[in-house]
Image: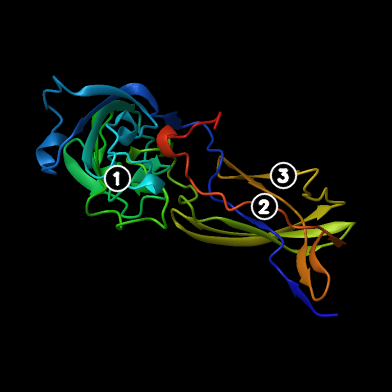
Amino acid sequence: MKRLIMVAGLVLASAAFAERTTSLCGTDWKFRRDPSRRAQWSAPELDETGWESVRVPHDWAIAGPFDPDGDGDTAKLPWRGTGWYRRTFTAKPLQGGRTYLRFGGVMAGSRVYVNGVYAGGFEYGFLGGSLDVTEFVKPGENALAVRADTVTGVPEKYWGIYPGAGIFRPVYLVEQPARHVLPDSIAITTPFVSATAATVHVEAELSDGWTNFSFTVRNPRLWDVDDPHLYELELFGETFRYGIRTAAFVTGDGFHLNGRRVQLKGVNLHADLGPLGMAFNASA
């Protein structure tokens, strides 16, 4: 009986950061549409009179107006355009540390400015990421501006779904000590799992190099569909979560989880809430 054994670990998309994480979500953002895409809107001293107060996560297109001749699969909403977001934040950089801005998702072609200086951005709207803004941040109050461009930053259609527009996921300020795990660099796998022991392997890029080590968990509590148990790994002041389980596709018998056959069920789930927008909506 042939078996294709898959990696029996969990690759971390994010971590529960220790103590220096600040949410930049909420109502204290200013917003305006601007088809000219002028970088002048990033200036710290800009007069924001006439700018709209919005809550982030935000999707500007759901304000309408509906286009009767628009595509039904994109909710007939005016998602094409360029928008600017502005707000201030207070930083308390750690001595010798690094400061990051973490974006869960900006649709699309984003450009990020800190105190009027371009700090980076993300072309693809459905993926978030972190920017190292240490050299642009000063202790105390800082000005943050984000440009979202769905004109040049989005293909004609994203597979026939509504793409949304704007900062549609949370934003965080992360201030790290001098030695820390670089954002999105850690991978935790469990290459060997039995009823009595599991090997946990960790690879991560640190601010001063790579770390690569393994350890053993005795009598592991396995991650399962009815008991999605997660372990926690503490590494340089951060907490990372991972699951221990085995997974295999068995020829002629389908998918096996932790040594037993499990019927795979699911849906083709897109971010397709249509006129509810792309901004995170727990009730939907």
- Cβ atoms under marks 2 and 3 closer than 8 Å: no
Secondary structure of residue under mark 1: loop
- Give the numbered dot on residue 266: 2
Q: In front of the other: label 2 or label 3?
A: 2
Asked whether, in this view, residue 78 is left or right of residue 233, the answer is left
What colouring style does the render use? rainbow
Quarter of the picture containing the C terminus is: top right
Above or below, 242 against 93 in this view is below
From the top left corner, tell me how far across and down residue 31 is, in percent: 24, 29
Q: Separation of disc 1 and disc 2 at Cα?
A: 31 Å
Q: Earlier in the sequence, mark 2 or mark 3?
A: 3
Residue pictured at 22% horizontal, 50% vertical: 151
Identified by mark 3, the residue type is: Leu
Q: Which residue is mark 1?
A: 70
* Residue at image location 50% in from the left, 56% down from the top: 185
Q: What residue is disc 3 on?
A: 230
